[in-house]
Image (spheres, rainbow, N blue to C red):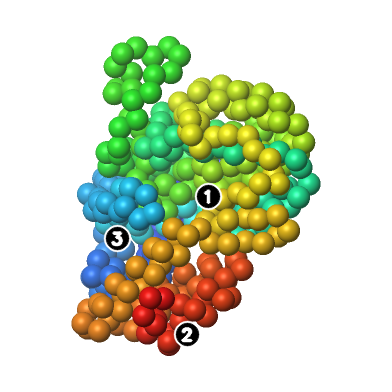
């Protein structure tokens, strides 16, 4: 086992490190009132954070919770901007320590990876093997067990003050939707007594979520020795020519996850033939290398576009913000066979879709 890292805290909590973290946290968000207020008094705010961290008095602030229903019901939690500065400072130092041990084929929240490379890797394995085991973890972010996560952090970190900061962020997580599942050895009240759940929306939550499933990655690659494997957060796939092998792997993965207080999703975990169309990370993947966007995705974008048009005409949103939102969808759509679709949606102009488009 690699030596545990020590003496990390000074690289996280110095004025220069926090100043750089503030600028990263503000990237693309300078129009946000919270970011603008922090940046207006940048040096004073950073000095205050530095003093609190040095004294061990920093505490996570109150989250702002946004409930969304598109594409599915979720709670998005926004930390105060000053907390996000701390998150960036921590992840800049701590994440690379764990990154070196991650397997190649985990793609979420990693430089040089991302959804599009994960989809391309899925297609490579699909074309080589006859069957795929698709897995999803039941209520993943709400189910992450704090004690297990803290133990994972201590596998590679020995710096007490850095672990204090990690613990403070984990313990400061706001309540998530309930996940009342009993695991072997639990009594009736155990699921209520064990703190669990990470807020969706934090940089640290993204890092912790990757770290929490890193043991699964190594189990799949080194114990099961799966010849094809792709994971993006809690959506993962194993490939093999024999369906019975994949069914046995499903059983063993369920047992492995049970020890980490996680469960496979009962309806989103299944074995299928790779020759059949598959939906993965927002694309419908077809034989022959074709990709489509799910109809629900296109429908949601059309509705969002109409809403943006109405807000723009009313003067409630500026052109730059509208273009940013449109460009993000177009960049995603461009990785599928959507040229005609995009031409149809925008043939009346960049923000004047024709009636019925």
Is 91 positioned to the left or the right of 80 in the image?
A: right
Residue topped by disc 2: 347
Q: Secondary structure at mark 1?
A: helix
Q: Position of residue 109 (x, y in %)?
A: 53, 54
How many discs appear?
Answer: 3
First in sequence, mark 2 or 1: give its number. 1
Location of residue 114 with respect to 137 vertically, above or below: below
Is 88 positioned to the left or the right of 173 in the image?
A: right
First in sequence, mark 2 or 3: give its number. 3
Location of residue 171 with respect to 335 vertically, above or below: above
Residue topped by disc 1: 95
> How far is disc 3 from disc 1 in space, using C-alphas?
20 Å
Residue topped by disc 3: 81
Q: Secondary structure at mark 2?
A: loop
First in sequence, mark 3 or 1: give its number. 3
Q: Nearer the viewer, mark 2 or mark 3?
A: 2
Is 299 positioned to the left or the right of 243 in the image?
A: left
Q: Residue at x 62, y 61 (%)?
A: 291
Residue neighbourhood size for the residue with mark 3, other residues' Cα within 10 Å, grouped as few (<14), some (14–19), many (≥20): many
């Amino acid at each position: 086992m690699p030596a545990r890292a020590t003496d990390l805290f000074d690289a996280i909590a110095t004025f220069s490190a926090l100043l750089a973290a503030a600028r990263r946290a503000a990237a693309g968000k300078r129009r946000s009132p919270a970011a603008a207020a922090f940046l207006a008094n940048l040096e004073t705010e950073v000095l205050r954070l530095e003093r609190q961290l040095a004294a061990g008095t920093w505490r996570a602030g109150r989250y702002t919770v946004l409930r969304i229903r598109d594409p599915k019901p979720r709670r998005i939690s926004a930390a105060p901007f000053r907390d996000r500065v701390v998150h960036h400072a921590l992840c800049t130092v701590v994440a690379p320590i764990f990154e070196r041990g991650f397997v190649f084929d985990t793609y979420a929240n990693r430089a040089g990876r991302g959804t599009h490379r994960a989809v391309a890797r899925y297609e490579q394995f699909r074309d080589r093997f006859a069957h795929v085991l698709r897995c999803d973890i039941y209520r993943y972010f709400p189910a992450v067990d704090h004690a297990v996560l803290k133990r994972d952090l201590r596998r590679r970190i020995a710096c007490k003050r850095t672990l204090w900061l990690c613990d403070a962020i984990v313990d400061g997580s706001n309540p998530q939707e309930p996940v009342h599942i009993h695991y072997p050895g639990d009594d009736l009240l155990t699921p209520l007594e064990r703190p669990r759940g990470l807020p969706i929306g934090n940089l640290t939550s993204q890092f912790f979520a990757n770290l929490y499933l890193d043991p699964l990655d190594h189990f799949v690659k080194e114990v099961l020795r799966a010849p094809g494997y792709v994971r993006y957060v809690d959506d993962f796939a194993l490939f093999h020519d024999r369906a019975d092998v994949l069914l046995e792997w499903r059983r063993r993965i369920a047992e492995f996850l049970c020890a980490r207080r996680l469960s496979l999703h009962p309806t989103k975990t299944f074995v299928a033939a790779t020759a059949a169309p598959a939906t993965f990370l927002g694309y419908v993947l077809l034989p022959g290398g074709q990709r489509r966007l799910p109809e629900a995705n296109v429908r949601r974008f059309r509705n969002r576009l109409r809403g943006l048009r109405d807000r723009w005409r009313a003067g409630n949103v500026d052109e730059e913000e509208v273009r940013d939102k449109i460009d993000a969808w177009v960049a995603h759509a461009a990785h599928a066979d959507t040229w005609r679709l995009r031409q149809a949606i925008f043939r009346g102009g960049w923000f004047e879709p024709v009636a019925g488009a």
